[in-house]
Amino acid sequence: MRCGTARRRLSDDIDGALRSGRNPGVEAHLRACPACRAYREELGRIQAAAALPAAPAPEFWDSFEKQVSRKIVAQEAGRASVAVPLSFRRRSAWAAAAAAVLAGVALGYLLLGPGPRSTEAWVPYGDPLDRLIFAAEADPELAGRVEQEFRVSIAELLPAPEETEVAAVFAADPFFWEGLSEDELQAIVAALETESGHGGPQ
Amino acid sequence: MDERPEERLVEEARRGGREAFAELVRRHERRVFGVALRMAGNRPDADDLAQEVFLTAWRAVGSFRGGSSFSTWLYRIAVNTSLTFLKRRGRERNRAPFDENLPVAGPGRGLPTGPEAASSLNELSARTGQAVAALPAHFRATFALVVDQGLSHAEAAGVLGCSANTVSWRMHKARKLLQARLKPFLEEVRS
């Protein structure tokens, strides 16, 4: 057994995930390999040292539960903006909307080809959607237009668009942001530009 | 103490029962907060994140169909919310790339004994926390679920939407990165 294989299995073993029958092979390797024995010992120490800080005191949880309840009540009363930071809510909506927009526009846009991308001229950093969102965060008017565009896109894609539906889209895929390719992100930005005329900073 | 089974609480919450949802919050707040803390790296942000997780869950619980356990679903929202939070905050962008060759300063002293040993362990713990915080976000999320929350690879895979093999690989890779980063410190403490 090679060291790389043994170390992968050592990691599995720490997690209780080493398949039965594999342990003897790992042990045999360890008997012959001082470097992997040292590696196992170091992993054990790292594992022990990686514990999270002690849980907050009971009064923290009392306060936490009250805050959550208060925000839910405020949200139910249509006053969520009082309770939840606006920027965070907006980002969440954008995140959910991006997934929906992606489904609607990425394929068509990519099939039609990228064409000239005027966004390149006005935002010199980051991936395309980030650029737009960063720009929007500094420009409330642009932010409003972008958010509206996302909401319109969701409304077109969902049969009964409600906040619950947006949240469900948001909750359904933990990694949609990380998984979007550059082309897909550009497609979202392009859709914002070409379909609504909402582009970069004025 | 509320003895109602979780399935009943979820069903009541799905129908708009705020009191039932409050009980679900009480049952899961520590786990959600643990994930948020590992991902955000500090308590104030973790507090905000954990609250946001439950607000998102409240908005979405009507669409929860029971395809997975409620805790898996909640973990998924926690990871998703944390990743989005980190991305939007630009922390991942601004975070120094993980350099496994970057030495972590050792304690700079010989064999620790007594109070010195305790201090050394505390320092190892602090440096390990820093090293975990510097892991790429997906690795950190996997680490939070497997190491902090004690989920099996299969359970973590259910949360993360990947295979158990991917969880295994991420844990292996994360440990290699941590070991490489902490190696100088580990060796010096051991010596």
Image (cartoon, coloured by chain):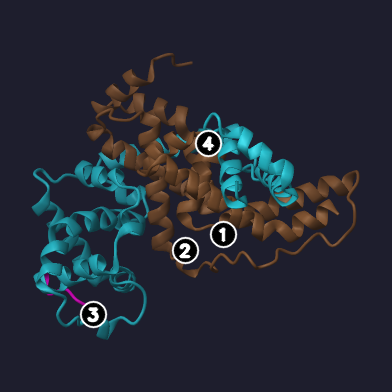
Chain colours: A cyan, B brown
Vertical side of B99 occupied by B176: above or below: above
Vertical side of B55 occupied by B116: above or below: below
Q: What residue is disc 3 on?
A: A119
Q: What residue is disc 4 on?
A: B149
Badge 2 vs badge 3, beta-carbon distance below 8 Å: no
Q: Position of residue B167 (x, y in %)?
A: 46, 44
Q: Which mark is residue A193?
A: none
Q: Give how far apart the Cα atoms at labels 1 and 3 are.
A: 32 Å
Q: Which of the 4 image quadrants contains residue B24?
A: top left
Q: Give how far apart the Cα atoms at labels 2 and 4 are.
A: 23 Å
Please say whether residue A44 is visible from this viewpoint: no
Q: Give how far apart the Cα atoms at labels 4 and 1 are.
A: 19 Å
Q: Give how far apart the Cα atoms at labels 2 and 3 are.
A: 23 Å
Q: Nearer the viewer, residue A146 or A50?
A: A50
**Same chain check for tags 4 and 1:** yes
Q: Under tag 3, what secondary structure?
A: helix
**Same chain check for tags 3 and 4:** no
Q: Residue at x 76, y 54 (%)?
A: B186
Q: Which mark is residue B134?
A: 1
Q: Under tag 4, what secondary structure?
A: loop
Q: Residue at x 52, y 39 (%)?
A: B146
Specify the farthest residue to the top: B3
**Amino acid under label 1?**
Ala
Q: What residue is disc 2 on?
A: B92
Badge 4 vs badge 1, beta-carbon distance below 8 Å: no
